[in-house]
Image (tube, rainbow, N blue to C red):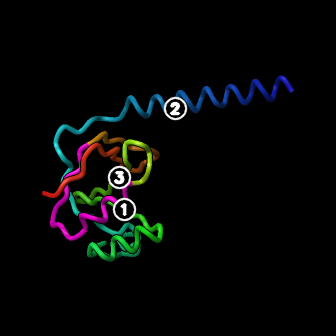
Amino acid sequence: MKTRIFGFLLLVAILFSAISTQESLAQKSTKPIKGQVVSFNDLVMGGKGTITKEQAKDLAEKGNPIVLKSGKTVYFVYNEDGSFAGKKLANYANNEFVGVVGKVKKVNGINIIIASMIESM
């Protein structure tokens, strides 16, 4: 029983250390990352990802990921409270460009922005 508790505490310590390391690797973006709001599913299936605001809102409501594409880089955008910002991004899908300011990091090869601000450009 003591071995299980020790193992559990060790696992928690390792996870906490990994999370702390990831946080320290995050870089705060001082200027917006400029890109387009796109459908991740469409990109994966070989499309351009281009969607209208109405399509984006509908897809986001159904749980499909709405992401930011900047050049050839795709970012999954999260709010500062840890919730996914796809529904918020969907409101900007008709804009030619959107800017996202926040912490940029890579987690397991996935580009993430913890957004402090999303704005039209």
**Mark 1: amino acid:** Lys
Is tag 2's residue or tag 3's residue first in the polypeptide sequence? Answer: 2
The magenta segment is 85-101
Is tag 1's residue or tag 2's residue first in the polypeptide sequence? Answer: 2
94, 67: nearer the viewer: 94
60, 39: nearer the viewer: 60
Q: Which mark is residue 77?
A: 3
Residue 98 shown in magenta: yes
Quadrant in which residue 27 is drawn: top left
- Quadrant of the image containing the N terminus: top right
- 35 to 20, vertically: above or below: below
- 1 to 79, vertically: above or below: above
Residue 78 shown in magenta: no
For label 2, the SS is helix
Which residue is painted at 21% across and 70% down in the image? 94
Is tag 1's residue or tag 3's residue first in the polypeptide sequence? Answer: 3
Residue 25 x/y as whole percent? 37, 32
Which residue is painted at 28% across and 42% down in the image? 102
The residue under label 1 is 87
